[in-house]
C-alpha cells in the first residue's frame, strides 16, 4: 500500500541542516539534526536516514534533557515513516506511540500538529495491517480520515492529496462493506468539491482505489449481491469520470460491469440495458474490440436468459 509522500507527512524544516550532531544539546541542535535526516530522505538516502534517526532517537531517550515537544514528536514521526518503508513494522508502531505521547502533551493542537497526527495514524494503520492486526488498522485509518476531513472542511484544502491517498487503502483494510461504502461516500464528496484537474499521484491513487472497488464488486456479483455491486461500481465510475474529466476507456470498462449488474436487478434492468447500449456505441466509435467482445458476451447471456424464461413459461402453459 502507498505511503503518504514524505513531503506531505512531516513538519517542514525550520532550520538549515548544517553539520548537526545526532547528540543535540538544545532545541536548535535537535531541529538541525531533524533537518539533516529530512534532507537525506529527500535525496533518496532512506537507509542512511533511518540509521541517523536511530542515533538521534537513542540520544533523545537517554540524554535526560527536555526538548521541544513538537520537534521530538516530528522526529518520531520521521522514524515511523522510515520504518514503515523499511518493513520494520513493530519499530514503526513504537515510533507512532512515542510521537502521539508527545503530541498529547502539547498545550495547543494547531493545524500542523493535527496533520502530523493524521499522518502518524495512517502509518500506524499500514503497520497494523502488515502484521494482521486488522481491528487496530481499521480504527487508525478511520481516525486519520476523520482528521483530514475536518481540516478540509475548515478550509485547509491543501490536505486534499492526503485524504485521497489515505482513502485509497480502505478496500484493503476495512472488512465491513458498510464502513467502506460510508468512507467512499465521504471521499466522493471531497473529490467532487475539489477545484481543478486531478492528476499525478492523486490520479494514480484514485485509479488504484477504483480498481480495487471493481474487484470487490466482481466478488459481490459472483455471490449474487447485485445491489451492493451496483453501489460499488457506481462509486468507481464517478471517481473515474472525475479523474478523466469526462468519459474514457477506464470508465467504459466500469460501465460494462455496472450494466451487467443492473441487468440482474429486475427493477433496474432497463437502465442496465440502456447503459450497455451506450457502452456498445462508445466502444464501436473507438474500435475497442476487447470491450465489444465483453458486451457481446453479456448480450448473449441475456438472450439465453430470455430464451430459457420463454421456454419455461411455454412448458407451464402448454
Image (spheres, rainbow, N blue to C red):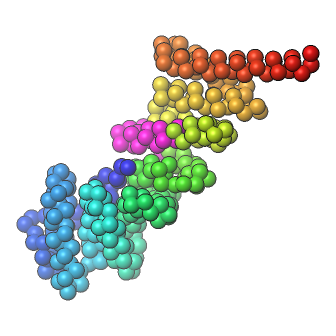
Relative to 219, is 57 above or below? below
**Rendering quarter of residue 258:** top right
Q: Would you say 53 lies left or right of 175 here?
A: left
Q: Is residue 49 visible?
A: yes
Residue 193 % position (x, y): 52, 46
Residue at x 51% of width, y 33% of height? 241
Relative to 311, is 251 above or below? below
Q: Is residue 147 visible?
A: no
Relative to 243, is 70 above or below? below
Q: Nearer the viewer, residue 78 or 222?
A: 222
In the current view of this chain or complex, which residue is farthest to the right? 317
In the current view of this chain or complex, which residue is farthest to the left? 19
Range of magenta residues: 194-214
Residue at x 52% of width, y 13% of height? 285
**Rendering quarter of residue 66:** bottom left
**Rendering quarter of residue 196:** top left
In the current view of this chain or complex, which residue is farthest to the bottom? 64
Residue at x 46% of width, y 31% of height? 244
Residue 88 % position (x, y): 28, 61
Amino acid at each position: 500500500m502507498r505511503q503518504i509522500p514524505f513531503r506531505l507527512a512531516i513538519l517542514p524544516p525550520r532550520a538549515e541542516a548544517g553539520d548537526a550532531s545526532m547528540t543535540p544539546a538544545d532545541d536548535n541542535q535537535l531541529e538541525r539534526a531533524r533537518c539533516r535526516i529530512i534532507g537525506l530522505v529527500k535525496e533518496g538516502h532512506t537507509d542512511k536516514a533511518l540509521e541517523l534517526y536511530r542515533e538521534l532517537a537513542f540520544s533523545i531517550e537517554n540524554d535526560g534533557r527536555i526538548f521541544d515537544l513538537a520537534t521530538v514528536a516530528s522526529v518520531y514521526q520521521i522514524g515511523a515513516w522510515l520504518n514503515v518503508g523499511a518493513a520494520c513494522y513493530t519499530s514503526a508502531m513504537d515510533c507512532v506511540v512515542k510521537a502521539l505521547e508527545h503530541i498529547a502533551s502539547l498545550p495547543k493542537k494547531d493545524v500542523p500538529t493535527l496533520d502530523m497526527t493524521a499522518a502518524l495514524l495512517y502509518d500506524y494503520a499500514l503497520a497494523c495491517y502488515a502484521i494482521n492486526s486488522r481491528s487496530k488498522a481499521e480504527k487508525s485509518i478511520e481516525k486519520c480520515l476523520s482528521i483530514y476531513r475536518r481540516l478540509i472542511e475548515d478550509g485547509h484544502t491543501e490536505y486534499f492529496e492526503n485524504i485521497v491517498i489515505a482513502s485509497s487503502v480502505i478496500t484493503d483494510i476495512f472488512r465491513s462493506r458498510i464502513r467502506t461504502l460510508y468512507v467512499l461516500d465521504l471521499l466522493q464528496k471531497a473529490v467532487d468539491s475539489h477545484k481543478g484537474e486531478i492528476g499525478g499521484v492523486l490520479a494514480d491513487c484514485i485509479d488504484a482505489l477504483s480498481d480495487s472497488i471493481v474487484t470487490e464488486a466482481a466478488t459481490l456479483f459472483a455471490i449474487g449481491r447485485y445491489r451492493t455491486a451496483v453501489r460499488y461500481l457506481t462509486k468507481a465510475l464517478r471517481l473515474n469520470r472525475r479523474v478523466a474529466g469526462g468519459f474514457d476507456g477506464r470508465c467504459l470498462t466500469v460501465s460494462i460491469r455496472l450494466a451487467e449488474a443492473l441487468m440482474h436487478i429486475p427493477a433496474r434492468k432497463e437502465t442496465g440495458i440502456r447503459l450497455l447500449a451506450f457502452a456498445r456505441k462508445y466502444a464501436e466509435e473507438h474500435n475497442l474490440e476487447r470491450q465489444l467482445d465483453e458486451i457481446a458476451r453479456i448480450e448473449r447471456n441475456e438472450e439465453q436468459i430470455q430464451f430459457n424464461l420463454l421456454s419455461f413459461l411455454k412448458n407451464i402453459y402448454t
